[in-house]
Structure formats: C-alpha cells, structure tokens
Image (spheres, grey):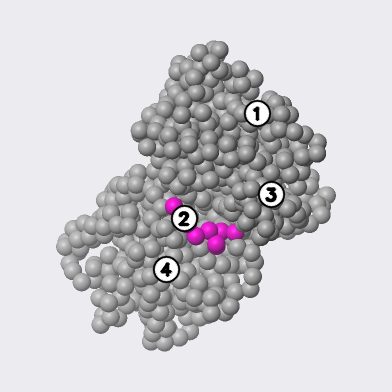
Amino acid sequence: MDLDYSKCWKTPKKESWKTVLLLSYQSLGVVYGDLSISPLYVYKSTFAEDIQHSDSNEEIFGVLSFVFWTLTLIPLFKYVFIVLRADDNGEGGTFALYSLICRHARVSLLPNRQVADEALSTYKLEQPPEKKNSSRVKFVLEKYRWLHTALLILVLLGTCMVIGDGVLTPAISVFSAVSGLELSMSKEHHQYAVVPITCFILLCLFALQHYGTHRVGFFFAPIVLTWLLCISALGLYNIIHWNPHVYKALSPYYMFIFLKKTRISGWMSLGGTLLCITGSEAMFADLGHFSYTAIQIAFTFLVYPALILAYMGQAAYLSHHHHSSHVISFYVSVPAPVRWPVLVVAILASVVGSQAIISGTFSIINQSQSLGCFPRVKVIHTSDKIHGQIYIPEINWMLMILCIAVTIGFRDTKHMGNASGLAVMTVMLVTTCLTSLVIIICWQKPPIIAITFLLFFGSIELLYFSASLTKFKEGAWLPILLALILMTVMFVWHYATIKKYEYDLHNKVSLEWLLALGPSLGIARVPGIGLVFSDLTSGIPANFSRFVTNLPAFHRILIFVCVKSVPVPHVPPAERYLVGRVGPTAHRSYRCIVRYGYRDVHQDVHSFETELVERLADFIRYDWHRTNWTNSCNEDDASRSNESSSESKLAVIGTVAFSGPPAYEIEENVQPESVSIEFPTVESVRDVIELEPVGKRVRFAIDDESEINAQTEVDAQLQEELAYLYAAQQAGTAFILGHSHVRAKQGSSLFKRLAIDFGYNFLRRNCRGPDVALKVPTVSLLEVGMVYVV
C-alpha cells in the first residue's frame, strides 16, 4: 500500500495564507466538532442538582464567568499558545509528548533499541547546551527505573481516559442533541423517543465506520461551520433581545460571588461547568493532520468567539426566565420558529463531533499497539492516499456496544456529563504533567518555568477534577472502571512482552551454530526464501533453532526479520529498512530490521514481501560495490568469501536503487531519497546507553557513464548472488513465526503468576495472532511452537 507520507516528515517552510486558511477551514470538521457542541449540555449539567437558578441571577452569572475564564485559560492559553508547540515532528497527543521525553532522556521501556535509530531524520533533537538544573532533572529521571515505569503508567492512564472518552462523548453528544424533542412532545412520549432515536443514530454511526471518514469528510467542515454560525447568531439575538448587559458577568468578581453564595454546592456543580472544554485535547491530538498556525487561527478567530457568544446568549435568556416550565437546556433559548432547523443542525454536529473522537480512539489504540502496550488488533487503512485514517473492527463494535449501554443505562445528561467530565480532566492533567517535563528536558527551560506552568494550570484542573470525583456515585465511576480495566490489560500485555523479549535475548543461539548446519548434519536447504520473524536485532532467535531441530531443513535464502517500533511518529520509507549479512556471503543469510513509527500503519504482506526483496537486492549491490570498489587493493574475493563469521554492519537502504559502482560523497545532511548508513548492532538495551553513534552518512552520486555501463562493471559474483535471490523469490516465500505460550517460572510471586499464566495467556488466546497482525497468508505460514518460562 502506497501512502502519502509527504506530510509526515516535511521540511519546515512558510505556508501561504491561502493554504493556512484552507487548513483552518478543514480543521473545523476534524478538530472542533466535539468542542463546538458543548453548549448543548453545559448549563443543563451544571444546574442538574447541586445549585438552583434564582431570581438574583448570581448563579447563572457566576457559571458564565467560570465558563468564560475556563475557555480562556485552558483551550486558549494552555493549548493554543503553549502545548501545541510541544509537537513531535508535527504530531501531537499523549504519545507525542512521551516520545519527545524518551528521545531526550533514556526513560523508554521499549526493547530492541539501537544506536542506528538515533540517525533517523525524524529523530531530530533540537538541543541547546544543557543547563545544570535541566540536566539534574534528566539525571534523576534516568537513574531510577521505577520513574520510567511511573511515567509509562501516567501515559497509559491518559490513553485509557481518551478511550473512555471515546465511549462517553458520542453518547452524551447525540443524546443532548436529540433531547431537543422534549419541547415538541409530551413528557410521556419524550422519554420513550429520545433513547431509541439516540441508539439508532449511534448504531448507524458505528456501522458506517468501515467506509472511512474520507468518503464523507468533506461534509464535516460545512456542518460545524454552520453550527458555529448558528449558535453565534442565537447568542447575539438573545443578548440583544433579553440582556445586553450580560457582558458584565465575564468579570472574575462573579466567580467569587457564586462560590460565596453556593459554597460546597457551587464547587460540586463545577463538574458540569468543566464540560465547556470537552474536546480541547483534540486540538493537540490532531495536530499532525493540519498545522499549528491553522489550528490557532481557527480557534482564536472563529471557535472561541462563537462559543463565548453562545454561552452569553443562553445566560442572557435565563436571566429573564427563572421559572421556565422546562428544565434548563440549550433549546429553551432557541426561538420557536427556528427550533426544528437548529435541532437538525445540532444532531448533525453531534455526529461530526462523535466521529472525531471515534477516529481519535482508533488512532491512539494503534499507537499503543505499536509501542507494545495493547493486544494485537486488526488495523485497516481506509484510504490509499491519506495517511492516518484507520479502522479497527474489534474496537469499533466494542465502542458501539458500550455507547449504547451508557445511553440506555444512564438515560440523562447529568450522569453522562459527570462521567465525561472526569475522563476529560484526567487527560488534561496528564498532558499538563508531561508538558512540564518537556519544558525542562526537551526545551531546557529553567525549572521555575515548568513548575509555574504545572502549578498554574494544574491547580485549575485539579479544582475541576476534585469536583468531578464528588460525582463518583452519579456516573463518574464509569471512566474510573474503564480505565482500571484498560490499564490492567495494557500493563499486563506490556509486562509480558518485555519478559518475552528478555527470554529471547538470553536464549538466542550463536552464529557458529547456524554456520555449522549443513549436509554433514543431515540438514538440507530447500528452494525459496525463509523469513524468520523475531524481536531480536542481533543473534539467531531460539524459534529458528527449534524449527531446524524439528524439521531438518531451511531455505536457501534466509532472512531474519525484526519488525520494530521506534519513538518517532513516522519513519520515512527511505529509512525504514536496516539490512546486513549474517555470516559469510556464501551462506546467503541476511538480517533485515523494519522500523515503524508509532503513527505508521504497517504494510500488507504482498507489498512488504516485494519491497523487502528489492531492498535486499539494493543492499547486495551496495555491499559488493562497497567492498570491491573501495578495498580492491587490500582484499580479494577469496578473503571476502572467508570473512569473519561475525555479523556485518547494518546499512540503511533507501528507496532509490542503484546498479553501478557508487561515487562516495560524504555529507552532513542526507536527503531521504537514497541513504546508506553503517552502525553496529546493539544486543541489549544497556548497550544503547554505552555506545555512541558511529559511522558516516553516505550518498550515492551516480554519473551517466556508470549508469550506462552498469552491467559490464558489476562483478560476476554479484550477478550470481542476485540471480540466486530472484530464483528463490520465484520458488516462494515462507513466513516462520513463533507460536508462543508463556508461563511464569516456579517461585514467582502471586501477582506475576496471575498476570502471566492467566491474564496474558487469556489475552493472547482471544486477540489476533502475529500472523493476522502481519497479514501473512495461511499457505505461506510456518508456525514454531515455543514455551516461554519467564
């Protein structure tokens, strides 16, 4: 599958105003759908139980003041002006912050890291000279392993709450929009109509997910724009018609009056007020699809003013309607002649807002899976042209069932709002904590700046978070329960994955054992290519030795493949394949490390197999020319064929093939079209800390003469090895994968036995196998049974 990666690692350049404005318009449908529909339920949730709307208007004006300053401080100041700058190569979100921290400080728990990963063009570190205080914080963070685990748990907590929000946001958004029917029918009919209609809309929404948002995405921006203009116009009308002086309530003085009068009830009601910033995290999470300037312009000049006008308009209306026959809701402030059109637009806008959070849930689960923190699921790319649009069938149907269950179970905005509010504030607190670390470690600002940021925004968010916790029995228990279940699943899976890697690392066999296999031992080599998959970046995996023990034969072309994730959002295709030899040339064994970023979608098996052979052929050409062209005076072919039995250095093979002797040109900055870099392999995570990057970046400049006479200059042995490779490709490819069973070793703690013997093995049996995740055809699959005792 060929995807457009041009936006993933683009070089910085100044965009035209036309492009920026177009991106701002497009961002309305993707980024701001959830945030823009919050006026549907904020006042209703705030006045649900704890406080009452009185004739003095102190309550409504106090809530308006809280809404105004919350929208100003959190989405505008925190996200638009600070957090959006903490991007990871243009990508945002919880994992982007974690990735940035992991690249600047060695706190990652990911296995099979290599020094070569630090040479990726997307692994750039923009580091000024380290300051004493920032280096001290970095030293402490790197020194204690329990801090690494705590940081991962913090990231997983934020991730779980985002997934929980993916359950709650569609339910509360659609339910609140459909609730407008209460003004057009009796209470008896209303309670039997809203829930079924909401469930039907949610069912349709999830049933259409497999088509992908690109098919209907062009409708999203006009719908949200229409909705924003609609609530702005309604707000202006209500301000002018009912209370032109409502702007006075924007003063912080009214917050003080509100809390003084309502006391603890007012504090508890803030659990509904915080819903005004639901969806703010999407500005950061969806940063990779747009640009910083586009999101900043869209929020500052359109979304923010429209929301403020909407809330002021509702407050102006309610300030003159204290004894309404209906409960406080958005629709009571809508004039009767336009109520039905507004209802239709509101439902459409709620669907758009729900779609954005569902797509974000798919994305963050794919990122979690890439980092080894989530069981394997089937990821389908719904667009051949637009990178990042994915669909996960299992997650989609689970979200649908949970959304419908929440709608039927709660049946009111109050409980849904309490649950959603706690999830939203938890994600924001996690973002605040991670951004504080980025300010110190990555930006290397004085710690006082990070502490000020943490205390100022953290105290505001803790105020709302504490108010949400008081609603535990009234709906807030749901995101906590979902987070506990998901965090248990994710942590058990990650823990077992690390233990399996450590087992493989300590049980790999020597290269001498592989080279000794031959006819004298009754081992035959059969036609074809054998792809042996493992997580090891060096050495021979134990599953291959077990394979040869049970079936005394292996393929004439043997490739040890490691598909790994690196802490960057995207790996450019030109830098994806790291290729080297295993043993002497005559053995025809190779190692290929395929690197993906946490936002990359893996290729399907057919394109992967074809590209792997092409990259291997490029490496063979490069390897022969490197040796014969530069060292022809120092070594001959005989010495080459009897070279040391150790593994050769790995080279990054780019996407542009070459067929003649290269003219070596040393460069500091290498373009990603054709790259070859040499690095030693690293056998353990500990080596990463001790080794520094070595080798030079090389670009191949091919002149016309060498290109024309390529066939005459290429060594005959090179042609023989290439012919051997292509003949093996025609004979067929076998995928050799380990089919693992993991059990805790004797003497393990009760927690470890529960996590491994029951938790992990239950997940392994009920999730996709590695063959399905890699999309391996059954006819080409060879599974090797492995028992891991960890």
Q: Earlier in the sequence, mark 1 or mark 2?
A: 2
Q: Which residues are magenta?
A: 1-9
Dots 3, 1 in contact, CB < 8 A? no
**Label 4 – label 1 distance at C-alpha:** 57 Å
Q: Position of residue 760 (x, y in %)?
A: 45, 28
The residue where tag 4 is placed is 29
- Magenta highlight on residue 5: yes
The amino acid type of the residue labelled 4 equals Gly
Along the viewing direction, whichever of 72 and 285 lies nearer the viewer: 285
Q: Say which element carries label 2.
A: loop
Q: Say which element carries label 1.
A: loop
The residue where tag 2 is placed is 2
The amino acid type of the residue labelled 3 equals Pro
Does residue 300 appear in this view? no
Q: Say which element carries label 3.
A: loop
Dots 2, 3 in contact, CB < 8 A? no
